[in-house]
Image: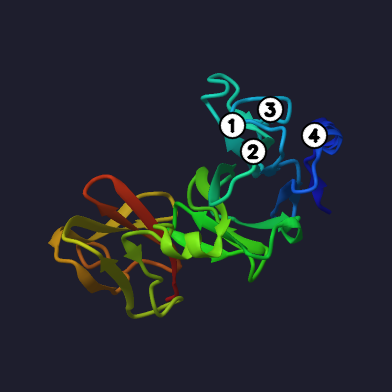
């Protein structure tokens, strides 16, 4: 049985939005499910009467202090104490707009994000979901549903809506690309690909599901271009690790973090 985590704010928002909706307004509902829980009280969009500041379209979202997944917009500039919001409605735009949101969830589980209402948007508008943690970008025109593995208690995402030309030409793709390891799952060895557009100081490390570093694959300067880093499922001392989920993290110039997930099978 799925437990639905809906709030009165959903009804309040829909009533407010419908009262002020114009012909070119649209709204997207972000629905989070994990098989046991469902959070369907998160909305973003545009309205001709909205502003970029906190206004009557914005509603706070209570964050439940329980080990359940929740999705919300984080706006400390609107309220430094209660910074989680269920809604983020902007004015109309011509080129592109980005909505940043967070997922709070216990780690080690997989959740599903579904974006409802995309058919309201102009067909000439592109829609992308950027997973800041993994560095991956999904085209929501291809599929309005995304499967997300929760590797951190708080995960960051960006929903980007804009003209096809703007999305294609802008720097939405991560500048530094950490590819998906292959094969995955693996037994004897896996390869982690990396692409650098410029020279950089790089650290690539392996962590277990408890967040403990088990291996440092590389630490030093790399020239721009493509690189591959093999890992054979062992620790620094050559101890073979057991079957399980492991994470590889790319740290660039001590500031940019990109992570990936892999499965070791013994």
Q: Residues within 10 Å of mark 4 (few under 14, many from 20)?
A: many
**Nearer to us: label 4 or label 3:** 4
User: Is tag 1's residue or tag 4's residue first in the polypeptide sequence?
Assistant: 4
Taking the image as shown, residue 80 lies to the left or right of residue 200, namely right
**Height in image: 107 above or below 195?**
above
- Residue neighbourhood size for the residue with mark 3, other residues' Cα within 10 Å, grouped as few (<14), some (14–19), many (≥20): some
Residue beneath the point at 72% across and 58% down: 118
Which numbered disc, 2 or 3, marks the residue closer to the eye?
A: 2
Say which of 178 and 66 sits in front: 178
**Mark 3: secondary structure:** loop
Q: If you read the primary sequence from the N terminus, does the residue marked by circle 1 or circle 2 appear first?
A: 1
Mark 4 residue element: helix
Counting from the top left corner in percent of width and height, residue 176 is at: 31, 60
Identify residue for label 2.
Answer: 91
The residue at 66%/68% (across/down) is: 143
Residue bearing mark 4: 13
Query: Where's residue 251, x and y in %?
Result: 28, 52
Name the image quarter holding residue 50: top right
Tell us which disc is closer to us: 3 or 1: 1
Instruction: Identify the residue under disc 3.
Output: 60
């Amino acid at each position: 049985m799925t437990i639905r985590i809906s709030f009165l704010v959903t009804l309040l928002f829909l009533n407010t939005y419908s009262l002020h909706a114009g012909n070119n307004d649209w709204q997207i509902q972000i629905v989070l499910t994990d098989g046991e829980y469902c959070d369907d009280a998160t909305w973003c969009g545009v309205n001709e009467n909205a502003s970029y500041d906190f206004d009557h379209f914005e509603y706070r979202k209570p964050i439940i202090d329980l080990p359940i997944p929740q999705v919300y917009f984080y706006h400390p500039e609107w309220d430094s104490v209660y910074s989680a919001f269920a809604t983020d409605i902007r004015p109309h735009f011509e080129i592109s707009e980005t909505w940043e949101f967070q997922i709070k969830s216990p780690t080690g589980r997989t959740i599903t994000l579904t974006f409802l209402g995309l058919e309201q948007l102009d067909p000439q508008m592109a829609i992308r979901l950027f997973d800041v943690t993994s560095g991956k970008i999904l085209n929501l025109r291809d599929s309005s549903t995304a499967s997300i593995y929760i590797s951190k208690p708080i995960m960051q995402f960006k929903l980007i809506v804009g003209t096809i030309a703007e999305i294609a030409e802008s720097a939405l793709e991560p500048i530094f690309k950490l590819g998906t390891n292959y094969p995955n799952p693996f037994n004897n060895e896996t390869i982690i690909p990396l692409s650098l557009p410029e020279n950089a100081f790089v650290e690539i490390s392996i962590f277990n599901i408890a967040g403990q570093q088990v291996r440092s694959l590389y630490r030093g300067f790399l020239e721009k271009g493509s690189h591959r880093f093999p890992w054979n499922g062992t620790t620094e001392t050559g101890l073979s690790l057991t079957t399980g989920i492991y994470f590889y993290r790319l740290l660039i110039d001590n500031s940019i973090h990109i992570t990936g997930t892999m499965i070791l099978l013994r």
